Structures are given as structure tokens and as C-alpha cells.
Amino acid sequence: MEIINLVELEALARARLPVSVFDYYASGADDEVTLRANRAAFERLAVHHRVLVDVSRRTTATTVLGHPVTSPILVAPTAFHGMACAEGELATARAASAAGTIMTLSSLSNTNVEEVAKASTTPLFFQLYVYRDRGATTALVRRVEAAGAKALVLTVDAPLLGRRERDVRNRFALPKGLFVRNMLAAGYGEVATEQPDSGLAAYFASLIDSSLSWTDIDWLRQLTRLPVVVKGIVRADDARRARDHGASAIVVSNHGGRQLDGSPATIDVLPRVADAVGDSVEIWLDGGVRRGTDVLKAIALGARAVLIGRPVLWGLALGGEQGARSVIDALQREFDVAMALSGCPSVAAITGDLIHP
């Protein structure tokens, strides 16, 4: 696939996907204020580029939790890739591996973690929701470890599902034949259709543990040998708490504007979070990343890496594995150009004075 930019993909995917599927992927909570704010906040930031820097040789390479990646662009955990293309998460895993980056597999995947791990030639991370059934959660963590995943990404901003009005209107449920595959064995694999509201909202309300607290990070760290990443941080004090409870990384995230509408844009809060924890823990960011300059801005303001979600889904819908690969490649190319034009021959050269000289 030839991709000019990631922004235009959404309209192309809308024409390809069923309404309920597109709305599920694209929607935010309530009035979608935060969904829009994530993009607007990036657009407000200027890059004060350096000149007369030798950028004839550049590298976008970096590491994430010690794992080499071709660029600081990772694949975010997003649910139900099987609605976008027949191969689902397998296509995404192959695309991420081919691009030399890392995929984070969602707990709500349509494909078993073991199959996705086999399809990956680069490290695989796994995003975790904690179920009320702690035995089922423990069994899932054990499976993830055995499959060879390299990190657990604990989502902490979803004790309940945000009210996504497009899903309510469509009475969203998984299409026939698709399941929450990793939870089938525990009996939690179906997202029911007989709901007056969103079927996924009902799933969360009945199964996901809304009593999760900071002590549960301690519980999870005792349960697993894998590094634990805490995803859903927008406050400096919460960033410090996550670090103090042993998180190896934190993800500055508002769940793509899908949880609390009115929560701040992630790039706006990134500097405060970075100031709060310094270099003591890795900081990743998601939410609204669509341009190579967005990646540059996030790195300059303290992120180690960014994660992209919806654009990968649009790529899957339009071209399967090759579509997803093309999305990652296009953003990596833009990032390389942004580095060159801002006077940065390496990721280490991307510093805060590019934004605040």
C-alpha cells in the first residue's frame, strides 16, 4: 500500500468497514472532547529546529526496556483486530516484526497469545486487564509468560468502560465467530449481543475488577517475573506512585479519549510527568500520534517511545498485514525526515530545547 499520511486513512477505512466496527475503533467517550484534544495539543506545539547540523547520517534506532527497536514507534494495545481483517492480530504481529518494532497484544484480542507470539520475530508485550476472577487472571499471566512475552502492560484507567455513545447507539457486540480468545478457557470469551447498551460495557461491568488499587501492582510483580508497565497515567503524583511500586515503565495515556471525557491531552501532561520521575523509569506516550513530528515532540518532552493504535487498525482494514506494515513504515519515514529537518542525527539528540528553546 502507498500511504501519503496516516490522517487520511481514517476516511478510507470508514468506507471499508461496517458502521458498528468503524465506530467501535474510531469513537471516544461522551462528547469526544479528549479524542479531539489529543490531536489539537500536538498541533499547538512548535518545533524550534536547529540548523547547520550534519544530518547526512541518521539513525532512528533506540531501545525500549532494553530491547532494540528500529524507531521509538511501538504498536499500542487495541482490541478485536479480527473485525478489521481475517488474520487479525497475527497480521499485526507480522507487520510490527517486519518493521523492527514491538507490538503490545491486547487482553481483548481475537487471537490466542501463543499464536501471536509464534508469529512475532521481535519482542511481544502483553496488555493486561485484571478480572474479578483472580484465578483466571493468574492463569492468563502464566500463559503470557510461557508464550514468551517480554513485558506486562497493566491498564489502570478502566475500572469501568467509558460511555462511548456510538457503541451504545449501535449496541456493539463482537461479530459472530469472534471471541476474547485468551479468556475462552475461563468462560469469559463472549461479548454478548443481547444488551440494551454496549455489549463491551456490560462485559467490563460484570467481569473486570473495579477495585484495583496500588497494592495490586505489588501483587502482580510478585506473580510474574516480567517487567510491569503501568498504562493510563496523566498525573505527576501517580507517575511517582507507579515508579515507587516497581513499574519498569509508565504510559502517559488517556485511553485514546475513550474513558474519561475531559481528561487532558497526553502531550500536554507529558512534561509534568517527565519532571516528576526523571530517568528513574521509562515513559511512553499514546494518544493522537499521527505525524513524524508528533513522535519528535513526544521524545523532546520526555518520552522514550510512543504507541500508535487506530492507524494500525485502519491499515489492517485496508490492506491486512501489508496495510499495517505500510502504516508503521510511513510514520517511521516521517519521523526520520522530522529528525533531519530539526537538526537531530539520533534519537539522543532530540532534546527539550526543540520545543522550549
Image (cartoon, helix red, strand yellow):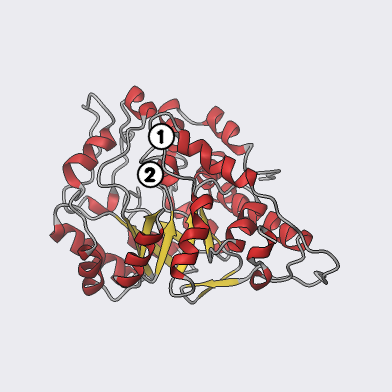
Left or right: 224 as drawn, with respect to 254: left
Report which residue position mark 1 lands on. 24
Q: Where is residue 113 in the image (x, y as percent from the top left)?
A: 34, 59
Q: Is residue 27 above or below residue 320?
A: above
Element on which disc 1 rests:
helix
Q: Position of residue 234 (x, y in %)?
A: 41, 53
Q: Are marks 2 and 1 in contact (CB under 8 Å)?
A: yes
* Residue 132 marker: none
Q: Label 1 is placed on what type of residue?
A: Tyr
Left or right: 344 as drawn, with respect to 251: right
Mark 2 vs mark 1: in front: 1
Viewer-proximal residue, 78 or 338?
338
For the C terminus, the image quarter is bottom right
Q: Quadrant of residue 193?
A: top left
Q: Can residue 74 be seen in this view?
A: no
Q: Is residue 194 visible?
A: yes
Report which residue position mark 2 lands on. 80
